[in-house]
Image (cartoon, rainbow, N blue to C red):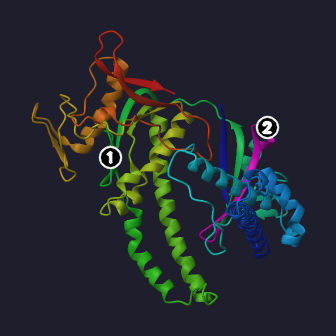
C-alpha cells in the first residue's frame, strides 16, 4: 500500500542555527506580505480605474495569483525588496508565496461557492509577533544524517533530540522517497517533519470479523459495545487550569511587548511566557498521546469500528459545555480512526449524525421522543430495559452494522423526521501524514429492491 507518511523529530540547534532557522521563517513572512501587497495594490488600482469610468478591457491587467507568476515576479525585484535574500534558502521565499497562492485560491473558491466548509476571508498580512514560525523545503539536500542529525538546505547539519536512524535506513534501502521537510517552532522548541512516499505492508486486525460500537462522551471518553472497559476522560486542561492561571498572572505582571509604544519585552516576561507556553504545550501533548493510544488499540484489534458523525462545531456553541468538549478532542479521534483503520486493514463506519443512538432501545428498538442529557440511565417503557445510556448508544451503533450486514430487520426510524436530513459523512479530513483514502463506510437509507421496505444500506468507499 503506497502512502504518504510524515516523520517528526525535535531539533537541538545551536544558538547560531536557531537564529538561522528564525531568519528562514522571517523570510517566509516577508515573501508572503510582499506578494499580498502586490495583489492588493493591483486590485485597488483596477477598482479606482473603474470608478473613473474606464472600460474593463482598458483596465490595468490583473495580476496572476498563481505561485509560478508570483515567484517569477519576486525573482525580478528581490534585489530591491530584500537585498539580504541570499542569506536564506530560496525555498523560504517560495514557501511564503505558495502559502499566499493557496490562501487566495481558498478565498476565491469560497466566494464562488466551490469550496466546502466555512467562508474564508481575504488573506491578511502576517505580523512578526503572531505569525506561526515555519518553513518548508522541497528541493536541495534534505535527509537524515547518521543517528542523531539531519541536513537541511543552507542550514546544514543540525542535531536532533531523537534518533533518526529508522528513517535513514528506510531511505537508504529504497523503501521510501523524500518529498519535503517542514521546520516549525512550537512552544520554544524547533521540530522538523519529513514527508516521504513509502510502501506500507497491508495490515490485518487481530479480530477481523469483530464489530465494535464506540460512543464518545465528556464524562467518559469512550464507551464500547463489547463489554470492553470504558476509557475515562483524563481532562488534561481542567487539571492544568490552576497552574495555567498562576503562570498567566506571572506573565501579566511583567513588562511585556507593546505595539503602540514599541516597548520591548523584558527578560523576565520572556521567561514567564515561555513557562506558560510549555505548560500549554504539555496539555496538548498529553491529550494527543492519549488519543493515539486509544485509536491505535481499536484499529489493531477490530475489523469494523462504528462511530457517530458528531457536530463538534455546533456542540461547542453551548457555553456550558464548550470547555469540556474542546478538552476531549472528538474531531481528532475521528480523524485518527479514519487513517489508522486503513493502515491496519479495518473499516470505519460513520453513522448518520441524526441516527438516534442514545434514544433507541438496544433491545426492542423503541425510540424515545426526548432524552435529556441529565438522564444517565436509559429505561425502556416497552421491554423494561434499564441500561447506562452510553452503553446503550454503543450497542445501537454496533447493531446498526450487524443488521446491515445480515440483511435482517428494518431501519430504526426517528420520530422527529431526522431520517430525511443530512446524510452521513466520513470521519476526519485530509490527514497531513497519510492523505491516502482509508476504507470508510457510509450509512444511507433506502427502499429494499424486493419488498420496498425501508432498510439501512452500507456503502464502502
Q: Depth check: 162 or 295 in front?
A: 295
Residue found at the far top of this picture: 450
Q: Measured from the top left, where is residue 132 in percent x and y? A: 63, 66
Quarter residue 202 falls in? top right
The image shows residue 215, relative to residue 189, as above or below, that is above
Instruction: Give the labeled residue for mark 1.
Output: 230
- Residue 305: image tag: none
User: Is residue 78 shown left or right of residue 368?
Assistant: right
Quick one: quadrant of the N terminus? Answer: top right
Chain-order first, disc 2 or disc 1? 2
Residue 153 seen in the figure = no
Residue span colored magenta: 171-189
User: Is residue 323 shown left or right of residue 50?
Assistant: left
User: Is residue 67 shown left or right of residue 303?
Assistant: right
Residue in view at x 78 percent, y 64 percent: 158
Residue in view at x 49 percent, y 85 percent: 252
The image shows residue 14, relative to residue 45, as above or below, that is below
Quarter residue 135 falls in? bottom right
- Residue 174: image tag: 2
Quarter residue 100 falls in? bottom right
Q: Measured from the top left, where is residue 286 in percent x and y? A: 48, 60
Q: Measured from the top left, where is residue 164 in percent x and y? A: 72, 53
User: Is residue 258 shown left or right of residue 39?
Assistant: left
Residue 354 seen in the figure = yes
- SS class of the residue under badge 1? loop
Residue in view at x 59 percent, y 69 percent: 187
- Residue 133 located within the stretch drawn in magenta: no
Within 10 angstroms of label 1, few (less than 14), some, or many (20 or more) residues?
Answer: some
Amino acid at each position: 500500500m503506497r502512502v504518504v507518511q510524515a516523520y517528526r523529530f525535535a531539533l537541538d540547534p545551536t544558538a547560531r542555527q536557531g537564529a538561522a532557522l528564525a531568519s528562514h521563517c522571517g523570510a517566509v513572512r516577508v515573501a508572503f506580505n510582499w506578494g499580498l501587497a502586490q495583489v492588493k495594490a493591483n486590485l485597488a488600482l483596477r477598482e479606482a480605474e473603474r470608478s473613473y469610468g474606464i472600460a474593463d478591457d482598458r483596465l490595468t491587467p490583473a495580476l496572476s495569483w498563481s505561485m509560478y507568476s508570483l515567484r517569477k515576479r519576486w525573482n525580478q525585484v528581490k534585489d530591491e525588496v530584500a537585498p539580504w535574500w541570499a542569506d536564506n534558502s530560496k525555498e523560504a521565499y517560495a514557501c511564503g508565496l505558495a502559502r499566499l497562492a493557496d490562501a487566495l485560491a481558498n478565498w476565491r473558491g469560497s466566494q464562488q461557492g466551490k469550496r466546502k466548509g466555512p467562508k474564508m476571508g481575504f488573506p491578511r498580512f502576517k505580523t512578526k509577533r503572531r505569525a506561526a514560525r515555519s518553513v518548508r523545503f522541497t528541493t536541495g539536500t534534505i535527509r537524515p544524517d547518521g543517528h542523531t542529525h539531519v541536513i537541511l538546505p543552507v542550514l546544514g547539519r543540525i542535531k536532533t533530540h531523537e534518533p533518526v536512524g529508522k528513517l535513514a535506513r528506510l531511505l537508504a534501502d529504497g523503501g521510501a522517497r523524500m518529498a519535503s521537510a517542514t521546520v516549525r517552532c512550537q512552544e520554544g522548541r524547533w521540530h522538523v517533519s519529513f514527508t516521504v512516499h513509502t510502501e506500507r505492508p497491508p495490515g490485518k486486525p487481530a479480530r477481523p470479523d469483530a464489530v465494535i460500537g464506540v460512543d464518545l462522551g465528556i464524562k467518559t471518553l469512550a464507551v464500547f459495545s463489547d463489554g470492553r472497559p470504558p476509557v475515562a476522560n483524563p481532562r488534561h486542561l481542567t487539571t492544568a487550569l490552576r497552574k495555567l492561571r498562576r503562570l498567566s498572572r506571572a506573565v501579566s505582571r511583567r513588562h511585556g511587548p507593546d505595539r503602540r509604544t514599541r516597548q520591548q519585552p523584558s527578560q523576565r516576561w520572556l521567561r514567564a511566557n515561555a513557562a506558560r507556553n510549555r505548560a500549554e504545550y504539555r496539555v496538548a501533548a498529553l491529550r494527543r498521546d492519549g488519543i493515539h493510544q486509544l485509536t491505535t488499540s481499536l484499529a489493531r484489534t477490530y475489523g469494523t469500528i462504528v462511530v457517530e458523525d458528531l457536530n463538534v462545531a455546533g456542540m461547542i456553541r453551548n457555553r456550558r459545555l464548550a470547555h469540556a468538549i474542546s478538552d476531549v478532542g472528538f474531531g481528532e479521534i475521528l480523524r485518527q480512526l479514519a487513517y489508522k483503520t486503513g493502515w491496519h486493514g479495518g473499516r470505519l463506519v460513520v453513522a448518520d449524525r441524526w441516527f438516534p443512538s442514545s434514544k433507541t432501545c438496544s433491545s426492542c428498538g423503541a425510540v424515545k421522543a426526548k432524552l435529556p442529557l441529565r438522564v444517565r440511565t436509559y429505561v425502556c417503557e416497552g421491554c423494561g430495559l434499564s441500561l447506562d445510556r452510553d452503553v446503550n448508544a454503543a450497542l445501537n451503533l454496533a447493531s446498526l452494522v450487524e443488521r446491515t450486514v445480515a440483511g435482517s430487520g428494518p431501519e430504526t426510524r426517528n420520530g422527529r423526521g431526522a431520517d430525511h436530513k443530512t446524510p452521513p459523512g466520513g470521519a476526519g479530513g485530509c490527514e497531513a501524514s497519510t492523505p491516502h483514502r482509508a476504507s470508510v463506510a457510509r450509512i444511507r437509507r433506502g427502499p429494499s429492491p424486493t419488498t420496498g421496505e425501508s432498510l439501512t444500506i452500507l456503502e464502502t468507499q
